[in-house]
Image (tube, rainbow, N blue to C red):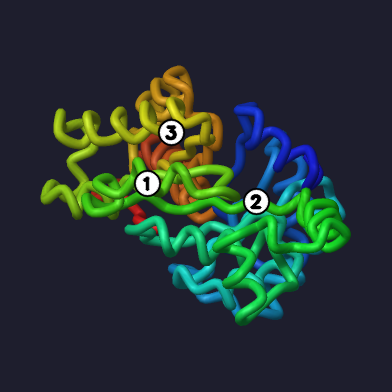
Amino acid sequence: MNNNEFVTALKTGGKVFGTLITSNAPSWPEVVASTGLDFVFIDTEHVALDRSEVSHMCHRYRALGLAPMVRISSPDPNEASRALDGGACAIVAPYIEDAEQVRQLAGAIKLKPLKGKRLQQALKDKDSLEPELLKYQEEHQADKALVVNIESVPAMRALDKILTVEGLDAILIGPHDLSCSLGIPEQYRSEKFTNAVNEIISKGLEKQVSVGIHVTYHSGLEQEIEWAGKGVNLIIHSADVIAFRNTMNSEIRRIREAVGSSDTNTNLKNINI
């Protein structure tokens, strides 16, 4: 799925499937491209990747037909702009908690390359832009998307206003941080957690904004499928490192059992990214 197809799907509610990529190994993109995914999620908030590495990854995945979505390390419009320059087609801003943060990010992404006072004026009144400039920006940023993480109680309280910001393409639920903000860390099956997720999904769909979720915790597949059935269309399933861990754990256990060797790894913990 190329950048235009990915952004169009987000804007029209089409389901898109991706995974978190932590490895920058040169041969890894070809492997990922063979899995049937639509996009890749590259995270610079929790994964130690520098700007050059991220740019190489973005361009390589784009060349292979996978749209690169990059989470920046903080909700900084300047950082969002740098990630776009590096080849990202979609920006994920972490831990958003008010509409003004989203508005500034939308300006950096959808009104690029405007900056400074000219940008602030345009954010207040888009009609202040000359028709030729507005057309230029719409054409050049048509394949760029803004996604914001909703992963705290304050974000949920501000969600109605966040969802009205022009230029927002999708919201992305962060289950781990949300569960902690709710005071029930990693209790993903609790009624309090599932009610919160359902509320976020419902509000996003009501405002016709795409809703995504990133499930990395062990045994979360059934919930992931259930939420997809309720309208979640930006689906980030697991991560390369988690898939490796789960497959290796299962297969090594089978080999141990076959040869009568004891299993020393009995603690399969969640990997929270």
Q: CA distance from mark 1 to mark 2?
A: 19 Å
Question: Seen in the image, is 41 located left or right of residue 217?
Answer: right
Q: Secondary structure at mark 3?
A: helix
Assess whether mark 3 and mark 2 are in contact (beta carbons under 8 angstroms). no
Q: Residue flagged by tag 2: what amino acid is it? A: Ala
Q: Name the spot of residue 188 as percent of width and height, x first.
A: 23, 37
Single out the mark in the foreground, 1 or 2. Answer: 1
Quadrant into which the C terminus falls: bottom left
> As shown in the figure, which amino acid type bears the numbered disc 1?
Lys
Q: Residues within 10 Å of mark 3 (few under 14, many from 20)?
A: many
Tell me the element at label 1: helix
Task: Mark 2: give few (<14), some (14-19) or many (20+) Cα within 10 Å.
Answer: many
Report the disc number at residue 234: none
Q: Residues within 10 Å of mark 1 (few under 14, many from 20)?
A: some
- The answer to which quarter of the image holds residue 189 is top left
Between 133 and 187, which is closer to the camera in this rendering? 133
Q: Which residue is mark 1?
A: 161
Q: Position of residue 246 (x, y in %)?
A: 44, 44
Q: Which mark is residue 145?
A: 2
Q: Which mark is residue 204?
A: 3
| Picture layout, residue 80 above or below residue 236 | below
Tell me which amino acid carries mark 3: Gly
- Pick whichever of labels 2 and 3 is earlier in the sequence: 2
Q: Position of residue 159 (x, y in %)?
A: 34, 44
Q: Residue at horizontal 76%, vertical 47%?
A: 66
Task: Estimate the spatial distance between the alpha carbons at disc 1 and disc 3, rounded to whole Å.
Answer: 11 Å
